[in-house]
Amino acid sequence: MPLITEPNLYSPDDFYADLIAAHEGLSDEESEALNSRLILILSNHIGERETLKQALEAAKKS
């Protein structure tokens, strides 16, 4: 499955606000751990290694 790189997120500003709120009150270490867990949960949801590899490459480029 090809990686979707065009805007595809419903209400991105609301999601960004939720993401920031999830980090409120956390130490840097706790915030990094939250990000790591979120990455693993979303990776599991995607489930396709090739798509995840494309996402890693896109993230490295940006």
Image (spheres, helix red, strand yellow):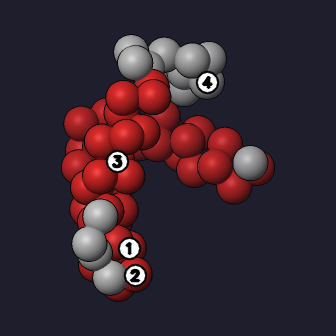
Quarter occupied by residue 6:
top right
Label 1 – label 3 distance at C-alpha: 13 Å
Return the residue at label 2: 28
Foreground disc of the pair 2, 4: 2
Return the residue at label 3: 19
Return the residue at label 1: 32
Return the residue at label 4: 5
Q: Are marks 1 and 2 in contact (CB under 8 Å)?
A: yes
Say whether disc 2 or disc 4 marks the residue closer to the N-terminus: 4
Residue 47: in sight, yes or no? Answer: no
Foreground disc of the pair 1, 3: 3
The amino acid beneath tag 2 is: Asp
Element under label 2? helix
Say whether disc 1 or disc 4 marks the residue closer to the N-terminus: 4
Up/down of 3 relative to 35, above or below? above
Label 4 – label 3 distance at C-alpha: 20 Å
Front in this rendered view, residue 24 or 7? 24
Say whether disc 1 or disc 3 marks the residue closer to the N-terminus: 3
The amino acid beneath tag 3 is: Leu
Element under label 3? helix
Quarter occupied by residue 9:
top left
Q: Residue 12, position in %: x, y?
A: 45, 25
Label 4 neighbour load within 10 Å: few <14, some 14-19, many 20+: few
At x 26% / y 55%, what residue is drawn?
22
Say whether disc 4 or disc 3 marks the residue closer to the N-terminus: 4
Looking at the image, residue 53 sits to the left or right of residue 41; the answer is: right
Label 3 neighbour load within 10 Å: few <14, some 14-19, many 20+: few
At x 26% / y 72%, what residue is drawn?
25
